[in-house]
Each structure stands twice: as C-alpha cells, then as structure tokens.
Image (spheres, grey):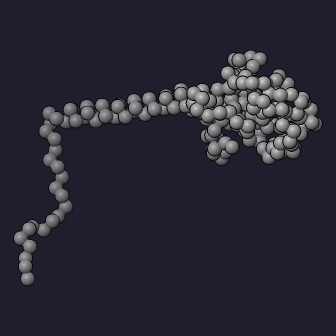
C-alpha cells in the first residue's frame, strides 16, 4: 500500500490582508469601477429612451379596451423614424395631432396609402371588403357612416378602438406620415396589464 507524500488538503487559507498603505487605493479603484458601471448603465438607458423606446402615458378612453386611461406604455420610435419598418394596417401608432401639433394621439392604423375606406353604420369596409375587427367589442361600436374615400399618398386613416368615444380620421381626416413618430409596443403599468401589444 502506497502512502501519499502530500499533506492532507484542508480549507484554503485566507489571503493576507492588504498593507495599510494600499487599502485607500483599493477602495478608490472599487469606487471608480462602480461609477463607471453606473455611468455606462445610464448611457444605455438614455440611448434606449432617446433613440429607440420612449415611455408614454395613455390619456383618455379612445383605445379601450386595448389601452385604458392612465396606462403606461413604451413606444418604439426607432423603426418608423429611420425607415426600418413600414407602417402597417393594425399598428397602434402615436402621432402629432394634425390640427394642433402640440398634442399627441394614439390610434390604430386602418388604411394605408391607396386603400379605399368606407364606413357603413359602424361597419368598416377596406377595399370593398368588410374588415374583421376583433379588437372592437360590440359595446364600443357606433352607427357612424363615412366615405367612401381613398387614402392619399403618404397619409393614413386611423381609428380608435372605442368607436363611440374616439376623435379620429372620421372627424378630422387623414394623418400625414410626417406626423407619425412611434409605434405602441409594450404595456409596463399597471403590472396586471404587463405585456406586448398586438
């Protein structure tokens, strides 16, 4: 039977304490590292908020039940602003109100350039076909008629989901592309509504 010449292995000895003169230097480097990480985190947050995502508060009931008054959402400003994604039917967009650009509205894109829109007692017809709108409950529908009319180039037809409580394209017309600055993508408050918008 062979015996192990090595001494038994026990718990590692703690490193010797730093000399007194080096302790302030180590504390200083720790503070610098912490400050650097904080600054980097703030920079990333600023980039996200300024260039990509912006938090906004929903005011009013025109997008119920999808969005309710005082909900907080994130909008994506990057996609539309830099032309990386086209505006599609069904998108919930944030735009400057054409009649007063100091105000922002949020509505749903119903018609894109070239589409023919007709509303017959609350039923929306897109290019001659009845539009199936599962996001509009019966209790939020109205009996308003509008059109028919074609959406002009570089403009959009928008409606609120709460048809009987929405100030939208039926009243003041189409929205020019230049006024649309974001797409609603995510609800972050209240917590029970947390999730991606569709």
Give the position of the N terminus as an image quadrant. Answer: bottom left
Left or right placement of residue 165 versus residue 179 in this view: right
Task: Determine which quarter of the picture holds residue 150.
Answer: top right
Left or right placement of residue 1 versus residue 142 in this view: left
At horizontal 86% and vertical 42% (from top left) the residue drawn is: 129
Q: Please tell me how many numbered marks the rendered image carries.
A: 0
At horizontal 14% and vertical 47% (from top left) the residue drawn is: 16
Q: As rendered, which of 9 and 144 lies closer to the eye?
A: 144
Q: As rendered, which of 33 and 125 lies closer to the eye?
A: 125
| Residue 171 screen position, x and y as percent | 85, 24
User: Looking at the image, is 113 positioned above or below residue 99?
Assistant: below
| Residue 154 screen position, x and y as percent | 72, 24
- Residue furthest to the bottom in view is 1
One can see residue 40 in this view: yes
| Residue 145 screen position, x and y as percent | 92, 32
Q: As rendered, which of 55 and 91 lies closer to the eye?
A: 91
Left or right placement of residue 98 versus residue 187 in this view: right
| Residue 18 screen position, x and y as percent | 16, 41
Q: As rendered, which of 21 and 82 lies closer to the eye?
A: 82
At horizontal 73% and vertical 39% (from top left) the residue drawn is: 90
Give the position of the C terminus as an image quadrant. Answer: top right
At horizontal 60% and vertical 26% (from top left) the residue drawn is: 81
One can see residue 56 in this view: no
User: Looking at the image, is 13 positioned above or below residue 60?
Assistant: below
User: Looking at the image, is 193 positioned above or below residue 58?
Assistant: below
């Amino acid at each position: 039977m062979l015996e192990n010449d090595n001494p038994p292995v026990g718990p590692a000895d703690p490193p010797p304490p730093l000399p007194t003169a080096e302790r302030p230097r180590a504390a200083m480097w720790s503070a610098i590292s912490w400050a650097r990480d904080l600054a980097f985190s703030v920079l990333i947050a600023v980039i996200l908020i300024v260039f990509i995502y912006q938090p906004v508060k929903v005011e009013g009931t025109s997008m119920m039940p999808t969005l309710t008054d005082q909900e907080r959402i994130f909008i994506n400003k990057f996609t539309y602003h830099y032309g990386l994604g086209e505006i599609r039917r069904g998108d919930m967009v944030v735009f400057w109100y054409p009649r007063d650009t100091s105000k922002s509205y949020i509505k749903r894109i119903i018609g894109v350039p070239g589409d023919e829109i007709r509303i017959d007692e609350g039923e929306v017809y897109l290019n001659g076909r009845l539009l199936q709108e599962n996001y509009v409950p019966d209790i939020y529908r109205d009996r308003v008629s509008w059109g028919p009319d074609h959406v002009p180039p570089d403009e959009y037809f928008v409606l609120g989901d709460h048809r009987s409580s929405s100030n939208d394209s039926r009243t003041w017309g189409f929205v020019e592309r230049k006024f649309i600055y974001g797409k609603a993508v995510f609800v972050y408050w209240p917590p029970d509504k947390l999730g991606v918008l569709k």
